[in-house]
Image (cartoon, coloured by chain):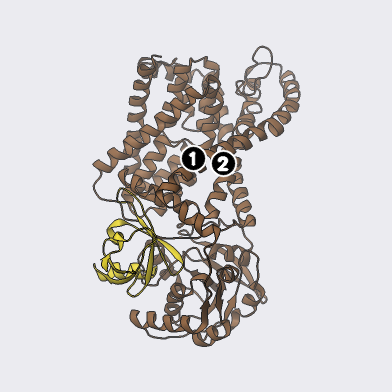
């Protein structure tokens, strides 16, 4: 049996899904998360049934890509659980009435019924059931209220084949709502007033700046706290163990260099030794993971509270100047965590042109948290000023290239037309589950690549290949960028892992100016291999090639300019 | 008084009396409750031709300027 979950966006459909199936899914508030549908299984009686989380849709006459998908999926469904937002019955019932025309068994879950109560909305469920002639069960997805009943009444789902025109549907809905719903007058709640204030430019823009600043403060606070209290002590205890391994391997030689790396002043330096069991595990765990974890914690909270659509509205007109619209903040923010999910989430932008611009800008000027963490550590040692140069340069590049692409590429960005959900307290179960999934994704994809990167550095060095490439690339690296020839090694490894690449700069003894130039060039010149694979999948080979040429060209141009401006 | 939806001031309400533009646009707007005889209240209009945000049926909807231009309202006194 195949069960379809269908309903408008933002009605808690994904929470219902994770409750029915118990599998891990990404649950959040902003439009677009469910464009890729999620599948799971649940038990109905003694049988296993397939449950499909269909993309949110307002109507079965598709107006968007996600709705087209929804209509397609309806053809293969055996029963539909129609999730209806009890706080906005009238609009939600439009889809319900359309479903009742499709000869498919339907059961209605009247979700958010607790929120409806708070808003002073009373619904006569019995009467609604009678008027629709399908089972109606009030539910509260985040607490699980009503789910037992929903599952037990699933076999009672009933199919109809009504025929309505648009006008008749609106009329019928109006009549139903009038008969079964009463709304008590009440004052605006604090959450509603906050909702209005954060979307009005005069109050909303300062709040947005405050939130972004707070976000970075919290990320630094958690990240540094984890490093100081967890990872530094752990690696402090590990250091003597690693030292004994080094001695056991004879304190030198090929194997020693790969496993432990170079001894610096007779000891292991976790950031510089470049061995698999030293730098290879220290970089992802003790330098990057704390910040990645902190970033996703903060981002998950922002997503699930309902703030991002408001941020999207505030930045919409600015985003149009660079060829996208307000919701492009979602891929850009996600890209700051890791470019891979960032690039995937660019699908919430409707046109290919928007996605090309979004991915190119992300590849050039949105460094991932792993890379940022190492840049913070390295460049930050020269003070906040040096860091500010790196961040400001990338931001200016992002804006300028965006403006240019918007001018050059034919076409326009579609307009924003979307519901802005009310602020909701995040459902911690779902937010933490998402945090865990994202952290796990980082651990399982980053660590193998970091180890591979470190291994490759050692092998290429001992074979003399990095020196060889350094010689070939020296007109560019030395001549244009003013870096030592050995920095070419970092550019090669940067294709594999940007964080390892930035880390490779440390033993080179660069000046502040050189470090700034190298960090900016490493951020811009090419996406890492994992991101590159997504680019090819999303844009195709031809557009990826275009995008890559822009990146390499701009990296050289900006790096050279920066070198001469800084007088390095 | 009849005016364009985008001409409503923040906090001002009106009843939608017409949507110019094609059937597709009318249908799309209707899915989020922007249709004839609906009461809307302006929450905010973003500067530089940014989107407007209106309240309709106790929910908030963001509408791009180009679409919002095509909605006519009878402003409440």
Chain corresponding to brown in the figure: A
Q: Chain of mark 1?
A: A
* The N terminus of chain A - image quarter: bottom right
Label 1: which secondary element: helix
x 38%, y 85%: residue = A163
How would you rate the neighbour count of disc 2 (Cα within 10 Å): few for under 14, some for 14-19, many for 20 or more? many
Determine which residue is flagged by label 1.
Answer: A336
Number of disc labels: 2
Examine the image and state in which quarter residue A475 appears.
top left
Residue A75 visible in the snapshot: no
* The C terminus of chain A - image quarter: top left
Determine which residue is flagged by label 2.
Answer: A295
Examine the image and state in which quarter residue B74 appears.
bottom left
Position above or below: A441 against A250: below
x 50%, y 57%: residue = A193
Position above or below: A519 against B62: above
x 50%, y 31%: residue = A498
Measuring from the top left, give residue A170's x and y in whole percent. Answer: 38, 79
Outermost residue, front direction?
Answer: B77
How would you rate the neighbour count of disc 1 (Cα within 10 Å): few for under 14, some for 14-19, many for 20 or more? many
In front here: A134 or A546?
A134
Measuring from the top left, give residue A282's x and y in whole percent. Answer: 64, 29
Chain corresponding to yellow in the figure: B
Residues beneath discs 1 and 2 located on the same chain: yes
In front here: A177 or A283?
A177
Q: Quick check: A385 left or right of A224?
A: left
Measuring from the top left, give residue A428's x and y in whole percent. Answer: 64, 55
Residues at circles 1 and 2 in contact by the CB criterion of under 8 Å: yes
Q: CA distance from mark 1 to mark 2?
A: 9 Å
Q: Chain of mark 2?
A: A
């Amino acid at each position: 049996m195949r069960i379809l979950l269908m309903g408008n966006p933002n009605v808690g459909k994904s929470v219902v899904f994770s409750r029915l199936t118990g599998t891990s899914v990404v649950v959040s508030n902003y439009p677009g998360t469910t464009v890729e549908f999620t599948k799971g299984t649940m038990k109905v009686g003694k049988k296993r049934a397939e449950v499909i989380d269909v993309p949110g849709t307002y109507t079965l006459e598709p107006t968007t890509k996600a709705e087209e998908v929804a209509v397609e999926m309806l053809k293969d469904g055996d029963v539909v659980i129609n999730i209806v937002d009890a706080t906005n019955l009238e609009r939600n019932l439009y889809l319900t009435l359309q479903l009742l025309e499709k000869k498919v068994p339907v059961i209605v879950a009247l979700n958010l019924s607790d929120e409806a109560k708070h808003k002073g909305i009373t619904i006569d469920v019995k009467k609604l059931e009678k008027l629709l002639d399908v089972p109606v069960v009030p539910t509260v997805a985040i607490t699980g209220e009503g789910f037992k009943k929903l599952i037990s009444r699933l076999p009672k789902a009933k199919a109809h084949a009504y025929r309505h025109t648009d006008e008749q549907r609106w009329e019928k809905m109006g009549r139903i709502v009038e008969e079964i719903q009463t709304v008590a007058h009440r004052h605006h709640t604090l959450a509603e007033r906050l909702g209005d204030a954060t979307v009005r430019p005069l109050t909303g823009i300062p709040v947005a700046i405050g939130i972004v600043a707070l976000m970075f403060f919290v990320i630094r606070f958690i990240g540094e706290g984890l490093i100081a209290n967890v990872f530094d002590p752990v690696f402090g205890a590990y250091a003597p163990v690693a030292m004994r391994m080094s001695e056991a391997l004879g304190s030198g030689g090929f194997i020693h260099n790969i496993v432990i790396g170079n001894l610096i002043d007779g000891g292991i330096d976790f950031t510089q030794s470049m061995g698999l069991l030293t730098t290879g595990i220290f970089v992802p765990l003790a330098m990057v993971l704390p910040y990645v974890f902190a970033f996703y914690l903060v981002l998950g909270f922002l997503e699930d509270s309902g703030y991002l659509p408001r941020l999207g509205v505030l930045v919409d007109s600015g985003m149009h100047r660079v060829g996208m619209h307000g919701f492009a903040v979602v891929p850009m923010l996600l890209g700051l965590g890791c470019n891979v999910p960032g690039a995937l989430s660019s699908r919430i932008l409707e046109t290919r042109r928007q996605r090309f611009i979004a991915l190119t800008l992300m590849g050039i000027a949105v460094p991932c948290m792993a890379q940022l963490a190492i840049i913070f550590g390295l460049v930050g040692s020269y003070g906040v000023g040096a860091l500010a140069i790196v961040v400001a340069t990338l931001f200016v590049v992002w804006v300028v290239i965006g403006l240019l692409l918007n001018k050059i590429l034919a076409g326009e960005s579609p307009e924003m037309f979307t519901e802005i959900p009310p602020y909701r307290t995040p459902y911690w179960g779902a937010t933490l589950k998402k945090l865990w999934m994202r952290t796990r994704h980082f651990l399982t994809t980053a660590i193998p690549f970091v180890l591979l990167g470190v291994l490759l550095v050692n092998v290429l060095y001992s074979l003399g290949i990095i020196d060889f490439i350094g010689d070939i690339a020296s007109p560019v690296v030395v001549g244009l960028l003013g870096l030592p020839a050995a920095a070419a090694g970092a550019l090669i490894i940067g294709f594999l892992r940007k964080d390892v690449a930035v880390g490779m700069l440390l033993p080179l003894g660069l000046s502040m100016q050189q470090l700034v130039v190298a960090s900016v060039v490493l951020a811009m010149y090419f996406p890492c291999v994992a991101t590159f694979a997504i680019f090819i999948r999303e844009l195709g080979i031809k557009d990826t090639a275009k995008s890559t040429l822009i990146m390499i060209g701009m990296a050289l141009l900006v790096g050279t300019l920066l070198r001469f401006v800084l007088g390095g | 008084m009849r005016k364009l939806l985008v001409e409503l001031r923040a906090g001002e309400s009106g009843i939608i009396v017409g949507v110019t533009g094609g059937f597709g646009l009318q249908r799309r707007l209707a899915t989020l409750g922007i249709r004839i005889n609906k009461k809307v209240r302006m929450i905010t209009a973003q500067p530089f031709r940014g989107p407007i945000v209106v309240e309709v049926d106790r929910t908030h909807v963001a509408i791009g300027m180009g679409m919002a231009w095509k909605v006519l309202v009878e402003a409440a006194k």
